Image (cartoon, rainbow, N blue to C red):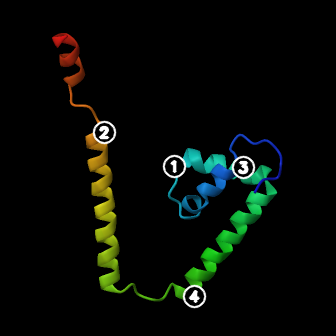
């Protein structure tokens, strides 16, 4: 989706982060970039408005239901598992401290 006009922030990037924006999960600087884009791009603003309306409808329709305790436990466990996997991937991607320097000196 695009209005065809050039923007500082591309439409694709805006739409990729639309739900983060709607859920207030973005840094303020990123929010400002999206707000500026919405002022310039009517198709993206329309998509934002539609998603905002859907989110409000869901909240009105389902907002009173309590989350089942077992579902909440499963979701939180899955989030912890994903985070642990991401931390492990970051640690394994980092070279050992001083390893590169020792290899160079030994040669």
**Vertical side of 72 occupied by 22: above or below:** above
Calculate the distance from the C-alpha at mark 2 to the C-alpha at mark 1.
26 Å
User: How far apart are labels 1 and 4 at the CA level?
Assistant: 29 Å
- Label 3, on which residue? 37
Q: Are marks 3 and 2 in contact (CB under 8 Å)?
A: no
Of badges 3 and 2, the one in the foreground is 2
Please provide percent x and percent y for residue 82: 33, 60
Q: Position of residue 76 (x, y in %)?
A: 32, 70
Provide the residue designation for mark 1: 27
Left or right, residue 101 beside residue 10: left
Q: Name the element at disc 4.
A: helix
Which residue is located at x 75 percent, y 60 percent?
A: 45
**CA separation, marks 4 and 3?**
30 Å
Label 4: how many residues lie within 10 Å, few (<14), some (14-19) or many (20+)? few
- SS at mark 2 in the image: helix
From this viewpoint, which residue is outermost toward the right? 4
The residue shown at (67%, 52%) is 12
- Is there a contact, CB below 8 Å, between mark 4 and mark 3? no
**Quadrant in the rendering for residue 67:** bottom left
77 or 56: which is nearer to us?
A: 77
Q: Which of pointers 1 and 3 lies earlier in the amino acid sequence? A: 1
Q: Residue 19's image quarter? A: bottom right
Of the two numbered discs 1 and 4 on the same chain, state the one appearing first in sequence: 1
- Check disc 4 and report the residue beneath it: 61
């Amino acid at each position: 989706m695009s209005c065809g006009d050039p923007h500082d922030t591309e439409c694709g990037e805006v739409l990729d982060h639309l739900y983060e924006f709607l859920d207030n999960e973005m840094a303020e600087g990123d929010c400002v970039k999206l707000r500026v884009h919405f002022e310039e791009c009517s198709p993206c603003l329309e998509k934002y408005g539609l998603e905002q309306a859907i989110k409000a409808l869901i909240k009105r329709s389902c907002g009173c239901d309590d989350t089942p305790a077992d579902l909440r436990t499963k979701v939180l466990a899955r989030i912890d598992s994903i985070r642990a996997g991401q931390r492990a991937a970051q640690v394994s991607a980092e070279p050992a401290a001083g390893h590169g320097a020792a290899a160079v000196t030994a040669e």
